[in-house]
Structure formats: C-alpha cells, structure tokens
Amino acid sequence: MWSSNKKQWVDNRKRVIRGGSAEDVGRCPLQIGVVSTGLITHNSTEAQVLRQLRFGTVLLDEAHKARVKLAFGKESGESNLRAFMVDIARTSRHILLGTATPIQTAVRELWDLLDVLSVQADFVFGRTEVRTWRLVDRTLPLITGASSVGDVSEAWDLIRSPLPPRSLSSVDARPLLESIRADLGLSNNEYFTSRGLPELGPFSRSDLEEAMRSDFFRFNNPFVRHVVVRQRKTLADEGLLARVGVNVHPDPAARPGTYGASFSGLGLVTNFSFEQAYDAAEEFGDALKSRGNGASLFRAIFLQRICSSFAPGLATVERILNKQPDDDEEEGLGLRSGTGLLDTLTTLEIGYSEQIRQELSRPEAVDPKLAAVKEFLESQYSDGKTWGEWGCIIFSQYFDAVAWVAKKLAEVYPERAVAVYAGASKSGLYRGGPVRVGCQRGDQGACEVTGSDVGGRY
C-alpha cells in the first residue's frame, strides 16, 4: 500500500519496503499495489507518475466518481479521476470498475463508466465514428424496453459497432452474429465493420429484421455484456456469501415517539424553515433550466446537499452569494469563477439563494438530524452499553455536515473527544474546540464518538 503522507510503500505487515519521494510510487516492489484515489482527484505528483506506467489490471473502487464533471457553459467536463482513468486505460490490459453507488444523480453516469471501459476496447461501445450506443437518449429506451428500433438501418448500426464476440453474446443472438460474420468474412476477434446492409446474405438480413421487431436489443447490448450486478441477497441465495443479520433503525413499524426524534417511516420530520428553504432550492433549480448543459445535474446535487443537513445547504448558498469558486473534486458543485454560474447569476436566482440563506439561518431552523444522532447514541444498547459508550462512527457524504455534527456533539458531550476523518487537510479532534491531527486522506467524511473502549482510533 502506498502511504501518501510518508511517500513510501508499506507491505501487509506494515513494513516499509521502498520510498522517500513521490516518484517512488512508480516503483512498486510487489506485484499488486494499492493507491488512494485522493492522489488522483487532487492531481498530485503521484498521479502524473502513474500515468506513465503500463498495468496488467487496474481496479478502481468508488468508480461512480469517474463520471463526466458538472460544468456550466460547456458541453461536458471531466473530473481529474475520469481523465486519469481514460489515460491509463490506453496502456492497461484489463480495467475493472467497482461501485456500490453506480448512479448518483443521472442515469447517463452509467454511460460514462462504460465509456472508460471502451478506451482501446472496440468490443465495449464500438468505434467512436459510429456513436449509436453512446447516445443516451436514444439507447436508454431500447435497453429498458420502452421503445424499439425504428428501421433496419438503425438496427444494423447497433449490431455492427460493436459486433460482439461469441463469448459475450447471448445464446439466442449467436446464430445471427455468426451468420453476419460468415457473410462478411469476419473473424471472432473483429468487433467492427464498415460494410453496409446490401452485403449481408438474405438469411442474415431476414434475422436482423426480425430482431428489430423484437426485444433483441434489450438483452443484447453493451450494458448486459459488461455490467455485473452482485447484490448481497443474490450472492447469499447462491451460497457465495454468508448472511449477515442487520437491525434497521428506526423501525418503520414503530409507534410515533419511540425514538425521541420525529420520524415518518425512515425519514426525519423537518420543520417549517427547512420546508421553506427546500421549496426555494427547488425554485432555484427550476430557474437554472434555461441554462442547458449542467443545469439538471447541478439542481440534483444542490438539493442533495440541502437534504444532507442544514450545514451543507447553508454553506452552498453562501458560496453562491459570495461568488466563491468551488473546485472540490470530491463533493463540489463545479462553481468556477469566470466561466460558470457565479458570474451570471440572475436577479431571480439571487433572490431564491437569499431566501434559502435566510430560512436556514433562523434560530428556529434546528436540524433534526442532531437530535436523532443524540437519541441513538443514548437510547440504543448493545451488550449492556449504549452505542455512545461503545463508540460509534457516523458517515456523511459532505464534509460540511460532518464538521457540523462533530462540533455540536462536542458541545453536548464536553468530556469526550469527537474525531473527524476527512482527508489529511481536514481531519481533527473536537473537544470544546477543534484540535487538528494528521490522518490518511479519505474519500468521505466520518465523525467518531469515542467511548471508553475505543481509544480514539478509526
């Protein structure tokens, strides 16, 4: 494993076996090396070194972060992680993308992931000059069964690029594909043809027309071929994974008042100020629709931040109103000075932002998540101790939410330390005030309430 703080390689026994400079990341002493994606998202020196290497297999965890970046005023933008993966895919024999959150804000992110796989691999998405499968609006209805192919020419474009090998074809599709290869004299490792429909034999043409009128492309497409869904229940049913008992809190069937905090099913009941702020946030998002590219994605992320807790919502509108650029690769909104939203805010958009800030800044705008966290720490027991006594880890997607919860819990429990883990530059301890400590860079924020048996370690 590469230690980004110490710039050295460490083996599974915690022994330092090589290192001293950022360039040493390119001289891994063992066959398998693990590197934090934080180095990539922050475009570090190590990332530039890794770009120059050739790999047998690259496995990217949290791969949904390698999506096209939100960008106003541009057709598309690339995150540092996505740009990195596109680069090293050109010199890697195998690429595996792993994610438990494949789609965060838009279904097109699945196309972004397959686009990474398709670099130097024509059999995934086909040649770039035939873009049929890359058109989300056209192919999404095909693979969901919402629509069918319009004519035989379109069906031919979907078949010929990519023309999948036998190993990636369904049993029902193989006769048609093998007939096409025989007609055109194509080997099994040729995945594209520029030749036209007239060169197909009558049997291939007839089978293609039949496929066009059926749900053929719903079961024969790049997503079925290259996306493997491994759900816990499915694996457990097949005996490949041990079943794990989980107690879900809150219990959706519990009577009102059971947990102290007010729940409606699994959701927390918010107050009037939040409802007003959320309504204004939706209006703000709707006002952005006329801007075209990036507006819908921005709206989704903006609402997601407001729902995370009051703190990220308030921090977001403060950045917008103060015109503070936000280039955070991990959780930013893509607010860039000079080219995006910040310099072109309309009077209407400013008005909605002011309303959000005003509502979330009211004294009565108390975030219910703090009361819920406190309730669970004090009222839930395991082996005779409360969760707070044992020690708990609380995760959030956004650092603003983590820092706010940690600060408030330190005020509620002044005798205890509350640790924040959120990367080397943001981690620290709260005990009557934040105390900075070093920590490995992470992908998410987490705060830990340390109990007597925990010792403050993550």
Image: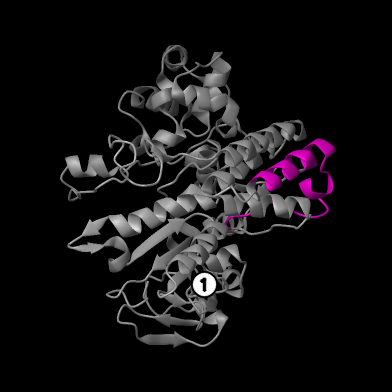
296 is higher (above) or lower (below) than 372: above
Magenta-span inclusion, residue 20: no
Using the image as rendered, state which of residue 91 and residue 137 is in the foreground. Answer: 137
Q: Give the range drawn in magenta.
A: 330-359
Quadrant of the image containing the N terminus: bottom left
198 is higher (above) or lower (below) than 57: above
The answer to whether one can see residue 36 in this image is no
Using the image as rendered, state which of residue 80 and residue 287 is in the foreground. Answer: 287
> What residue appears at the point 50 percent right and 19 percent down from the top-left corner?
200
Using the image as rendered, state which of residue 158 and residue 362 is in the foreground. Answer: 362
Where is residue 27 drawn, in percent x and y? 48, 79
Quadrant position of residue 336:
bottom right
> What residue appears at the point 61 percent right and 66 percent down from the top-left corner?
42
Where is residue 156 drawn, in percent x and y? 53, 22
Q: How is the image coloured?
A: one colour
433 is higher (above) or lower (below) than 97: below
Magenta-span inclusion, residue 338: yes
Where is residue 387 drawn, in percent x and y? 29, 61
How many labels were placed on the picture? 1
**Is disc 1 surrounded by few (<14), some (14 to 19) or many (20+) residues within 10 Å?**
many
Quadrant position of residue 221:
top left
